[in-house]
Amino acid sequence: MSILDSSPLFECLDQAQKHQVLQFSKLTKCERGETIWAKGANVDFCALIEQGFVQMVRASGAEPEMVLEIMGPGQVFGLLGTLEGTGCPLRAQALTNVSYLQIRKQDALAAYQQSSKMKQILVSITSRRLHSHHATVAALASESASKRLSTMLLTLAESYGEWVEEGVRLKLPLTRQVLAQMTGLTTETTIRILSSWTQRNLITTHHRFITLLDLPALERVG
C-alpha cells in the first residue's frame, strides 16, 4: 500500500494523480524534539506522517509556549498553508521520532485542484478540527485546571486511544510538560493532578504512555 493510502485526503486520488504526487516527494526522518519548521517559515512542502507524532506549537514572545494540536500517522500538516500560499503560523516539532513524506507545494496544489473528492474531504476534516478546537478553547477559558486536563485526555483518547484490558491507552507518549502546554497549566499543577488521579485509580502511566482507567469518572471531573 502506498503511504498516500494512509491518508483520506490522498487515498481518494486516482493512480495517475498519486503517481504525480509521489514522483518528486521524499520520505524524511527526524528525531524527537527536532523542529521541522519554525513559525513564519515559508516552506516548499506539506507533510504526510508515516510514523510518529508531530506537535504544532504556538510561541508568542514572553508568554509560555502552547501546544495547539498533535498530528499522527496518516495526517497531513501544512496543507492549508500550501493551498493559501501563506507562511507557517505555528512551529512544527517532532513529539517522537518521526518519518514523514514531504510533498511539494505545487504537486499538492495540483492534486487539490484536480480532485473534487479531495476538496470535499478537506472541508470535512477542517470542519471537525475547528469544532474540536472550539470545544477545547471553551474548556480552557472557563473550566477548572482538573477539568481542562480531563477534557484534553478524553479528546486525545478519541483520536489516539486504543482499548486494552485496563481501559483506553493513549498511543502517543506524553510528558507532563507537553500536557501542561496543551492545557495552559503549569507543569507543577499538571503533575499534582495526574498524581491524584493515579492514586484514585482513574489513570495509570508507564513510560510516558497514559491509560484512562475510568472514563465516566474523568468525564465527571469538575
Image (spheres, rainbow, N blue to C red):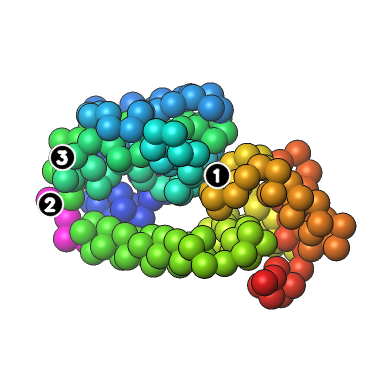
CB atoms of marks 2 and 1 within 8 Å: no
* Residue at figure coordinates x 73%, y 60% from the top left: 212
Residue stretch rendered in magenta on the structure: 113-117
Residue 209 shows in this picture: no
Q: What is the three-letter code of the residue carrying label 1?
A: Gln
- Residue at the image point whose x is 41% and y is 48% from the top: 75
- Disc 3 on helix, strand or loop? loop
94 is within the stretch colored magenta: no
Looking at numbered disc 3 in the image, what kind of residue is underneath it?
Gly
- Callout 3 touching callout 2 (CB < 8 Å): no
* Identity of the residue drawn at 74% across and 72% down: 217
Q: Residue 153 — which label?
A: none
The residue carrying mark 1 is 181
Q: Is residue 215 above or below residue 63?
A: below
Q: Amino acid at mark 2?
A: Gln
The foreground one among 98 and 117 is 98
Question: Which picture quadrant has residue 177?
Answer: top right
Residue position for label 2: 114
**Element marked by disc 2:** helix
